[in-house]
Image (spheres, rainbow, N blue to C red):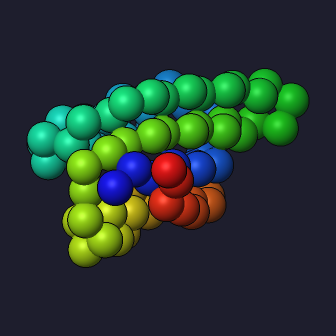
Amino acid sequence: MKYQINIIAENQQIVVYRIINLFLKKKIFIEKIEANFNEKENFSKILIIIKNLNQNMIETTIKQINKIIEIKKINYKKIL
C-alpha cells in the first residue's frame, strides 16, 4: 500500500529531521518528501509519500509523529 501523509508544523527545520528519523528507525521507505516553509505564517507544509505499509503500521506511525510538539495537524490517505 502507498500512503500520502500531509503535515502542518511549526516552521522549524528540526521538525523535518525528527520525522525522517522516525521513519528511519522503523525502516520505512520514504518514496517522496516535500517541505514548504512559509515565513509569513510561521508554519511548514510537509508532504510525505511512503509505501509497503499495512494499516496498523501507518496508524502507529501517525500517532508517533503526532507526539512531536511542533506538529499542528496531520492526516493521511491511501493512494494508488
Residue 47 relative to residue 61: left or right: right
Residue 65 % position (x, y): 38, 56
Task: Tell me the residue at 25%/49% (across/down).
Answer: 52
Task: Tell me the residue at 25%/74% (across/down).
Answer: 56
Residue 76 relative to residue 51: left or right: right
Q: Please, is residue 28 above or below residue 60 in the view? A: above
- Would you say residue 42 is visible in this rendering? yes
- Would you say residue 67 is visible in this rendering? no
Question: Which residue sits furthest right?
Answer: 40
Write down the quadrant of residue 62 in the picture: bottom left
How many numbered callouts? 0
Task: Tell me the residue at 50%/50% (across/down).
Answer: 80
Residue 21 % position (x, y): 25, 36
Task: Tell me the residue at 52%/53% (across/down).
Answer: 79
Write down the quadrant of residue 12 in the picture: top right
Question: Which residue sits furthest front?
Answer: 80
Q: Please, is residue 8 above or below residue 17 in the view? A: below
Residue closest to the eye, 61 or 50: 50
Residue 51 relative to residue 75: left or right: left
Residue closest to the eye, 27 or 63: 27
Q: Please, is residue 15 above or below residue 65 in the view? A: above
Q: Quadrant of the N terminus?
A: bottom left
